[in-house]
């Protein structure tokens, strides 16, 4: 009896192959090849890097000058309508449909996406609840604050239950509390709710907080694409050490063992151990013993996303 | 008692969802719904009924005089009063309410969306530029058509019942089907022109004022030309001069309509009947104007600003 083995694995959300988008003669996205995995992905890059242009091309708003690709298994050149049935967009710019309340706006967005009217209205209430727009949903959108408008924009992007949501600079114009709430919402949607999210931002902390994978862009090209965890990892020889007490001699003891102290703040040390001879842990504990101190933390060092980002751009 | 149980976490939508064939209808229905919420819509729709009331009055006066046994003495008076089809043409020719209503509904139809960046919301959904354009056009056309239709339909029904069905149909029976065609002429023209003008700006006021300026200027220019050529040294024939008078948006709308009705509104004071004009060249002119308006709108509708160069 023959059995077939089915291996379930993550399908990529998008696969782009040498994609080039031009405005006239100027290429805003050039020779862009990458695979965007499922989950929460950050598009990171300075202003003018081509993030928004890339999103517009993936939505089918812009015709590629060369190359191509697929989004959710559909061709971005020819299947724009089908793609937009399964995708939600929260644009960067302030946008709404004038003269209607938030609940009408979101329900109308649902109808435009092909939902029957009754379903669209019920679903609009659900997503507005989720986006924490309580009674304000019955007010005209023109009277909303920036934070409320951002929430309404997110709600209209989610109303039809998309498989993928593009969030273009979602924290624009938000105060710190509003920003944290928006990032919490994004993290919640993209983890365990069956929605893939692509967040475009030039703000590193935003990407770091809500994304698992990052694509760094500069001048319309991919500079790096890694999971956040991988991108933050340093080589195996750099470790963070925390002592129980302040010590003047710990650094010297480490140096006598061939290690280099990269930074030291109070009881925290970042140390690079030499390859070969002795394991980093043994060396660190021996140095602590020599200066009669105790080690409280010993862990591989991690870079900040900012360090990784700057390194990628260099 | 604690609060009721409600799941406020995010859940994926698993209800029906389709790519509807009539996607433009969603846009049109929304536009009509928003239009009918405006007080101005109901005020202008009510005002549009005024000409039909005038028709009732004149028809009543005429029928009362005709029923008088001393009709011979009143023959000249009867001749000076317009017939039913002339009154009907007068109702059709009362363009201002339909024009103002078109301005109210059409000036902001795309301009307001431009200002609010709503095109990104529309076009990020599974609808095409054509769906959006047709939907927006219909959201102006349908209310304007219905408001134009109401007074004409009421007038015909009044005529049918006041003159008597057996007398009405031999004389004016063709007016009944024409009643459903006539209001479409100004509705099509105003919707198409306004949608083009509206797509050019982000300000509904600018769109409204611009269209009014073009409309008034064209009407005035045609009228001045008519006066000059008809009564000046050139002394153009009445038919030729009337054609020149029709070479404006409103002139062409009226000219085609009057030709279709087969009667012109009569100037009561002078008891003078305006000559009719050939409708074909006017229809071609209006068609080109409409195509231009729709072409401009189609070119301007886009989800992204496309920078050339």
Image (cartoon, grey):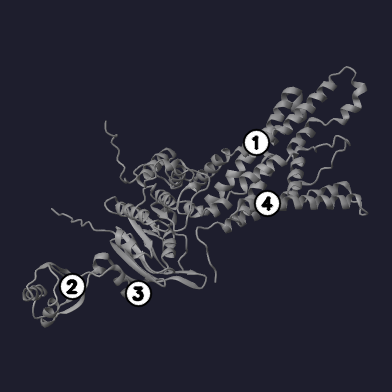
Q: Is residue A153 left or right of residue B186?
A: left
Q: Earlier in the sequence, mark 1 or mark 4?
A: 1
Label 2 environment density (alpha carbons within 10 Å; few <14, some 14–19, many ≥20): many
The answer for which chain carries disc 1 is B
Q: Label 2, on which residue?
A: A269
Up/down of A83 relative to B32, above or below: below
Mark-to-mark CA distance, 3 and 2: 27 Å
Kindly indicate whether the residue at mark 3 contacts the one at mark 4 (C-beta within 8 angstroms): no
The answer to whether dots 3 and 1 both sit on one chain is: no
Quadrant of residue B261 within the rendered picture: top right
Query: Residue at point 71% right, 29% down?
Result: B156
**Mark 3 → mark 1, Cα distance in angstroms:** 63 Å
Vertical position of residue B14 compared to residue B119: above or below: above
Chain under disc 4: B
- The answer to whether residue A104 shows anywhere in this view is yes
Indicate which label's residue lies in the foreground, 3 or 2.
2
Q: Residue A313, labelled with which disc? A: 3
Q: Bin the neighbour count of mark 3 within 10 Å (Cα to Cα): few under 14, some 14-19, many 20 and up.
A: some
Give the residue pinned by disc 4. B209
- For the residue pair A228 and A178, the one nearer the viewer reads as A178
Query: Mark 1 — residue?
Result: B43
Residue A24 in percent (x, y) is at 52, 70
Q: Nearer the viewer, mark 2 or mark 1?
A: 2
SS for dot 2: strand
Q: Residues within 10 Å of mark 1 (few under 14, many from 20)?
A: few
| Chain hosting mark 2 | A
Q: Quadrant of residue B88?
A: top right
Query: Label 4: few (<14), some or many (≥20) within 10 Å?
Result: some
Q: Position of residue B267 (x, y in %)?
A: 84, 37
**Chain to which the residue tagged by mark 3 belongs:** A
């Amino acid at each position: 009896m023959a059995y077939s083995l089915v291996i379930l694995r993550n399908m990529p959300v998008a696969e782009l192959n040498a994609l080039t988008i031009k405005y006239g003669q100027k290429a805003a996205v050039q020779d862009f090849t990458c695979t965007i995995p499922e989950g929460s992905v950050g598009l990171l890059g300075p202003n003018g890097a081509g993030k928004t242009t890339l999103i517009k091309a993936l939505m089918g708003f812009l015709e590629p000058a060369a190359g191509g690709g697929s989004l959710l298994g559909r061709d971005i050149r020819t299947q724009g309508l089908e793609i937009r049935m399964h995708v939600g967009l929260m644009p960067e710019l302030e946008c709404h449909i004038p003269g209607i309340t938030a609940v009408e706006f979101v329900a109308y967005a649902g109808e435009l996406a092909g939902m029957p009217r009754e379903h669209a209205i019920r679903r609009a209430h659900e997503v507005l609840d989720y986006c924490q727009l309580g009674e304000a949903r019955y007010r005209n959108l023109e009277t909303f604050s920036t934070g409320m408008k951002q929430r309404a924009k997110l709600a209209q992007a989610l109303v039809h239950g998309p498989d993928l949501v593009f969030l273009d600079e979602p924290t624009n114009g938000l105060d710190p509390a509003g920003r944290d709430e928006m990032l919490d919402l994004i993290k919640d949607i993209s983890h365990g709710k069956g929605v893939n999210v692509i967040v475009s931002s030039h703000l590193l902390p935003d990407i770091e907080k809500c994304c698992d994978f990052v694509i760094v862009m500069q001048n319309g090209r991919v500079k790096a694409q890694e999971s956040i965890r991988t991108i933050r990892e340093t080589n195996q020889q750099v470790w963070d050490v925390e002592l129980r007490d302040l010590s003047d001699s710990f650094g010297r003891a480490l140096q006598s063992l061939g290690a280099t102290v990269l930074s030291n703040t109070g009881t925290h040390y970042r140390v690079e151990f030499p390859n070969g001879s002795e394991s980093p842990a043994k060396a660190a504990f021996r140095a602590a013993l020599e200066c009669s101190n105790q080690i409280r933390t010993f862990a591989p060092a991690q870079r900040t996303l900012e360090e990784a980002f700057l390194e990628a751009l260099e | 008692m604690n609060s009721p149980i409600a799941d406020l976490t995010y859940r994926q939508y698993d209800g029906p969802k389709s790519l509807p064939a009539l996607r433009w209808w969603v846009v049109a229905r929304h536009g009509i719904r928003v239009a009918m919420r405006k007080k101005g819509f109901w005020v202008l729709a009510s005002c549009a009924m005024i000409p039909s009331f005038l028709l009732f009055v004149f028809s009543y006066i005429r029928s009362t005089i005709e029923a008088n046994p001393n009709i011979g003495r009143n023959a000249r008076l009867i001749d000076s009063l317009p017939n039913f089809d002339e009154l009907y043409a007068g109702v059709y020719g009362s363009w201002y309410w339909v024009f103002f209503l078109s301005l109210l509904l059409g000036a902001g139809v795309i301009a307001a969306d431009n200002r609010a960046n709503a095109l990104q919301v529309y076009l990020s959904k599974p609808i095409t530029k054509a769906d959006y354009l047709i939907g927006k056009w219909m959201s102006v056309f349908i209310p304007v058509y219905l408001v134009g239709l109401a007074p004409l339909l009421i007038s015909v029904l009044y005529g049918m019942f006041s003159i008597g069905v057996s007398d009405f149909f031999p004389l004016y029976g063709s007016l009944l089907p024409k009643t459903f065609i006539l209001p479409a002429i100004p509705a099509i023209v105003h919707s198409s022109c306004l949608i083009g003008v509206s797509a050019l700006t982000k300000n509904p006021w600018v769109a409204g004022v611009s269209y009014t300026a073009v409309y008034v200027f064209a009407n005035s220019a045609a009228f001045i030309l008519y006066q000059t050529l008809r009564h000046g040294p050139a002394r153009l024939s009445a038919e030729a001069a009337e054609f020149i008078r029709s070479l404006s948006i409103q002139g062409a709308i009226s000219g085609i309509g009057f030709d279709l009705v087969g009667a012109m509104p009569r100037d009561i004071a002078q008891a003078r009947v305006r000559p009719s004009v050939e409708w074909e060249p006017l229809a071609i002119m209006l068609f080109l104007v409409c195509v231009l308006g729709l072409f401009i709108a189609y070119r301007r509708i886009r989800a992204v600003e496309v920078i050339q160069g």
